[in-house]
């Protein structure tokens, strides 16, 4: 019997061990159990959603330059829209759209191509004029802008709430959730997974799903699978309540600088890259970043210069060389599946990827062909560079 508490000792066996209790792992465990897979174990070394998921901005979009990413984003959006009904759990979904602000003709031309691809796949994306962009997001400065791209169906929500909803549903279907349980080794014999060693004891299994985000490279190494995932620190700031209707604003992104903002309750959540990338497992907040962010605000959203800061945090992107995810099954090790390296858009693709991992385990054809996302592309130079990253 599965309960909401963590077992003192890990189960002795499992049909599947899902490693990582963020959105990817929780969704995968849920969809496996929903499909009738018994003895699914979800292992998380801390609290559920405590890694990159809880540090995410919560954006949900289908505006990508890669066909697979568009499909994964759109499918996940469908799930998030139904979440309250299907999971009986509120995720504070705000469907105010996503607006990309473009300040040069080269980016505008690239977005025109991307929008055409998105439209061909049934998405409501469209290019907008500078005047239209200002009407959608009235607090911006239009200085230097040449165009925008907008999808009114894109949204944002609370990441921790989505993880909690998936985890509760997974538990109800029999998934054992082992929190505060560290994976210390993945046992491989004769080229096949045979078990997982944890801080709460061994688990015999023939299948592991690595959904450990930025820590996936180390887990892959335990099984002899190379997963080129590296950390990139990103910081976020949340303001005190503002004197306008923040929830009416779209998730607004100044594409050339990656400065963005969206509503967070009665205030705003803002983010941007650092002046110099920090590619280490370092989640300390850098006070110099606040000064950098202030400059970006002054340039693109001067109406926000006087807002007061309420809180902030730093988190880690899980990056790959081409900014695209790693999704698939290891060719060299039987029973090792992976879903990681989402380079900043993992939360928004989590539900769809959970379905994909279920289908890969069951030997079904997923709703989208994810074979181009396999790690093997790095040995054949068949990279799929995603352009619409933030």
Image (cartoon, rainbow, N blue to C red):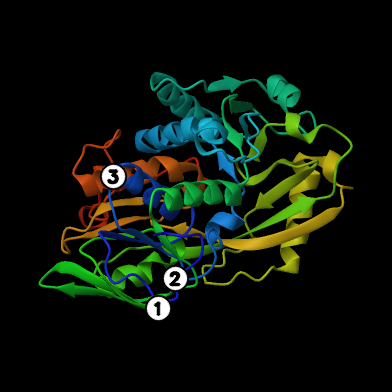
Cα separation between marks 2 and 1: 9 Å
Residue denoted by label 2 = 7
Return the residue at label 1: 200
Q: Work out whether 304 lies above or below 44.
A: above
User: Could you give the CA–CA distance between mark 3 and mark 2, rounded to whole angstroms?
Assistant: 22 Å
Residue in the picture at 33% in, 69% down: 11
Within 10 Å of disc 2 (Cα), the crowding (few <14, some 14-19, many 20+) is some
* Callout 2: SS: loop
Q: Are marks 3 and 1 in contact (CB under 8 Å)?
A: no
Q: Position of residue 102 (x, y in %)?
A: 61, 33
Residue at (61% x, 38% y) in the render: 156
Residue 46 placement (x, y as % from top left): 52, 69
Asked whether, in this view, residue 216 is left or right of residue 314, the answer is left
Question: Looking at the image, is mark 3 or mark 1 earlier in the sequence?
Answer: 3
Q: Write down the quadrant of residue 93 in the picture.
A: top right
Rendered-image quadrant of the N terminus: bottom left
- Seen in the image, is 35 located left or right of residue 309? left
Q: Earlier in the sequence, mark 2 or mark 1?
A: 2
Q: Are marks 2 and 1 in contact (CB under 8 Å)?
A: yes
């Amino acid at each position: 019997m599965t309960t909401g508490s963590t077992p003192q000792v890990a189960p002795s066996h499992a049909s599947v061990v899902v490693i990582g209790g963020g959105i990817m792992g929780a969704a995968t465990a849920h969809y496996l159990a929903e499909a009738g897979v018994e003895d699914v174990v979800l292992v998380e070394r801390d609290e559920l959603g405590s890694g990159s998921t809880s540090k995410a901005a919560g954006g949900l979009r289908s505006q990508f330059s890669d066909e697979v990413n568009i499909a994964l984003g759109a499918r996940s959006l469908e799930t998030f829209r139904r979440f309250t009904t299907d999971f009986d759990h509120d995720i504070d979904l705000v469907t105010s759209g996503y607006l990309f602000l473009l300040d040069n003709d080269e980016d505008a031309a690239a977005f025109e191509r991307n929008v055409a691809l998105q439209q061909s796949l049934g998405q409501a994306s469209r290019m907008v004029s500078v005047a239209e962009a200002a009407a959608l997001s009235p607090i911006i400065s239009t200085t230097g802008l040449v165009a925008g791209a907008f999808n009114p169906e894109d949204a944002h929500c609370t990441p921790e709430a989505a993880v909690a909803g998936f985890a509760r549903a997974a538990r109800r279907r029999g998934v054992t959730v082992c929190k505060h349980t560290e994976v210390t080794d993945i046992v491989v014999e004769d080229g096949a997974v045979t078990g997982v060693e944890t801080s709460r004891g061994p688990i015999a299994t023939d299948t592991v799903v690595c959904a450990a985000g930025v820590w996936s490279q180390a887990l892959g190494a335990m099984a002899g699978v190379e997963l080129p995932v590296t950390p990139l620190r990103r910081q976020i700031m949340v303001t005190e309540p503002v004197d306008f209707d923040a929830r009416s604003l779209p998730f607004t992104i100044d594409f050339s600088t990656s400065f963005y903002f969206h509503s967070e309750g009665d205030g705003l959540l803002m983010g941007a890259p650092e002046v110099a990338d920090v590619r280490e497992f370092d989640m300390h907040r850098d006070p110099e970043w606040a000064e950098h962010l202030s400059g970006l605000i002054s340039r693109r959203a001067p109406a926000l210069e006087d807002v007061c800061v309420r809180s902030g945090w730093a988190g880690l992107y899980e990056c790959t060389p081409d900014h695209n995810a790693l999704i698939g099954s290891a060719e060299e090790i039987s029973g090792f599946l992976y879903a990681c390296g989402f380079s900043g858009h993992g939360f928004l693709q989590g539900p769809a990827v959970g379905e994909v991992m279920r289908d890969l385990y069951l030997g079904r054809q997923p709703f989208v062909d994810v074979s181009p996302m396999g790690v093997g592309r790095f040995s054949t130079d068949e990279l799929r560079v995603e352009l619409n990253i933030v």
